[in-house]
Amino acid sequence: MLTQLVIFDLDGTLIDSLGDLADAMNAVLDTRRFPVHPLDSYRHFVGNGIEMLVRRALPSAVVNESNVAEFVGLMREEYSTRWLATTRPFPQIPELLATLLSRKIQTAVLSNKPDSSTRTLVGQLFPDHPFVSVRGERNGVPRKPDPTSTLEIISELEVSPQKTVFVGDTPIDITTGTKAGARTVGVAWGFREAHELLDAGADHVIHRPLELLGFLEGTARGEARP
């Protein structure tokens, strides 16, 4: 089956943003003398939006609605000062996007990052790539793994779910794509291990971005797992 649309997660899939997210959150924690966390811990803190990141990073004894709301605001402010300090596209991502474009496969981005931040990051880091849709977390719209935004993108582009591939680095992304009826590809270079993505039901897991092309070619020939 020919693929007409690939929807990408952003953080941990297209871009390596873990260092900037961790540095910003640790800076906020340090202002209150709360314990900071090693970089690797943030692999399991991120993915569910900024509020969940704050809840996971704060000491459990101080997690309440008031403190979470305060630290979400502090985190947004701190991250806005350093969101491009070290964040860059992963190796091979620009080449992958260029190849998909040359093959007339549409590409979109769906993130649990705030919508404005998502659009800004994509615009800064991929200024020359024509994504057909870029969306982050929006008021009144449930975030991933709810499939609402994914289905909106598919519907607006008049593409069937069966001809859509959802690519992401966390079980949340795999669940999102599955609920929307799309095929799913987990990426092992992001914030989670390959076995977590397979356990979540990923149709395939890749270890380098350009391997996605092999998956797409295989499914076009009718192979379930190239």
Image (tube, helix red, strand yellow):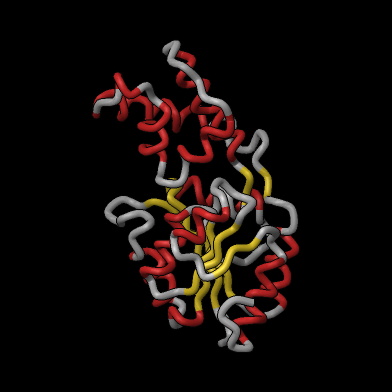
Q: Nearer the viewer, residue 148 or 201?
A: 201
Q: How many marks?
A: 0
Quadrant containing the C terminus in the rendered view: bottom right
Quadrant containing the N terminus in the rendered view: bottom right
| Residue 158 at least partly seen | no
Residue occupying the point 60% across, 41% down: 17
Q: Is residue 81 above or below residue 32?
A: below
Q: Is residue 140 above or below residue 156?
A: above
Q: Nearer the viewer, residue 178 or 158?
A: 178
Q: Is residue 114 left or right of residue 39?
A: left
Rendering coords of residue 82 (x, y %): 59, 31
Q: Quadrant of residue 33?
A: top left
Residue occupying the point 33% across, 65% down: 148
Rendering coords of residue 92 (x, y %): 74, 58
Q: Is residue 206 left or right of residue 169?
A: right
| Residue 66 at least partly seen | yes
Rendering coords of residue 87 (x, y %): 65, 41
Q: Is residue 24 above or below residue 122?
A: above
